[in-house]
Image (spheres, rainbow, N blue to C red):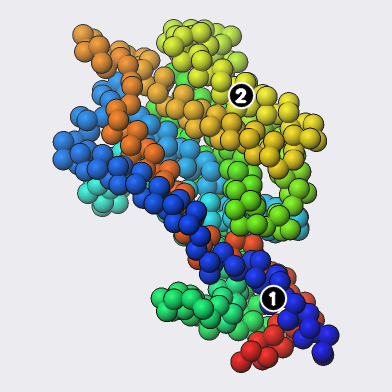
Amino acid sequence: MNKVLQQEQLYRTKRGKALLGHTVNTSLKYKLWITFLLIIICIGGYAYYRQLKFGLIITAMRDYTSWGIYISNFVFFVAISLVGSLISSILKLNNNNWSRPLTRLSEIIAVAAIICAAVIIIVDMGRPDRFFYVIMHLRIQSPIIWDVIIISTYLVISLLLLYLSLLPDIALCRDRLTVIPKWKKWLYRTLSINWSNHPKQIEMHLKVTKILAITVLPVAFAIHTVTSWLFATTWRPGWDSTNLGPYFVSGAFMAGAAVIIVGMYLVRIHLKLKKYITELHFEKMGRLLVLLSLVYLYFNINEYLGPAFKMVGVEGEHITELFTGKYAPMYWFVQLVGLILPIFFLIFKPFRKPLPIFIISIFVVLGAWLKRFLIVIPSLQHPYLPIQDVDESYLHYIPTWEEWAITFSSFAWFLLIITVLIKLFPVIPILKEKLDSETIDKLNIFKNENS
């Protein structure tokens, strides 16, 4: 018994301090980071105010390019939101225990991304009140309503997965963190909903978590498949393809894996969690990123090779503009720097160390966003039935400062949500999800000792 108490005391002093310290201590670096994000958000808020006041005419979107970087952002955020299902569902159900320290970070990223994806769509609509028309006058024939339903479903499931994984640790914060503001104590007490690590609670918790982990898989595949249908069901060069569903899904998993690697590195450095997010995790994620990139490379070749062989009509013009035209520098940057070179470098073990893979993943994420830009914009500028005698500005799309400000603001919101959640809650799961009888006894002793 004394040995168990000593072990729990060690847990409280060393491991608890390492994993809970950031929730109590607020550094100057954290305050400056939050201030920086809020400044970007305020600039974006002013740009959005101008958009509400003057309408979408302040953007560069016209009758040709009716979707701009707002939709590129939407597709990007939807893509990286799949990281939650990749880490917390697929790897968890396969009993890959090495990924356990990454589950909460991936779930936080997924929640932040899907929230921003939903909001950016409302921004793109011009008038926010029109979102309610989509619900009030829904047409089941339209893929748009499918997208609304599947995104809402994925958001709810992602929130539940995150909350359930946090629940035991929120109770731990409630019991252990005493030198914190009253609002924080109230928050932990409210969210913990009387959790006491009782065996029946744990049993129910495991069942519900497993059900959600299974349920999120088809929803995760559906969310990007349905998003791809928004493109594929419109007759446009570059979109008129049956390949878009798996193409989008594979690209989403690759982008999501790169985002989690970037997040791992930053959390590991700034929260001093090298003991918990080890080089082994970067090694495993590096191999996973290579696998996902190879799958995406296959679909990428498949997507462009067919039209490139035919080079017929507007499809040929679209491919020519990507390969050798004004979008060629961006296209080849995406293919080479954002896809092929990362695969090549990550094959070698030295590049799967924390710093090299962090840098490589940044280029993968940048390539993923530029790829979404290339999916949206060039196709819209090559319609099968061009409008006659239009203004020259209709034929080109260069985002205005308002569009860029709102875009950067959406990324600032994404980072702010992640930062606040990491600040409030332990980013590494403290209590194991699978608790045997011995661990349950220890937890009960741990609770009784401090009651």
Is residue 252 among what the camera can see?
yes
Q: Position of residue 10 (x, y in %)?
A: 75, 77
Give the residue number, with chain letter if any, for mark 1: 13
Q: Is residue 33 above or below residue 189?
A: above
Quickly name the residue at label 2.
Answer: 337
Amino acid at the residue labelled 2: Val
Residue 57: which quarter of the image?
A: top left
Q: Position of residue 264 (x, y in %)?
A: 63, 49
**Residue 139 horizontal/vertical position (percent):** 32, 44
> Which kind of residue does numbered mark 1 sit on?
Thr
Distance Cα–Cα, label 2 vs label 1: 45 Å
Of residue 167 and residue 227, the one placed in the foreground of this image is 167
Q: Earlier in the sequence, mark 2 or mark 1?
A: 1
Which picture quadrant has residue 294? top right
Residues packed near mark 1 inside 10 Å, few (<14), some (14 to 19) or many (20 plus): few
Location of residue 435 with respect to 58 vertically, above or below: below
Q: In the drawing, does residue 145 fall left or right of residue 289?
A: left
Q: Please, what secondary structure does the residue beneath circle 1 have? A: helix
Viewport quadrant of the N terminus: bottom right
Residue at 49% x, 28% y is: 370
Q: Residue furthest left?
A: 53
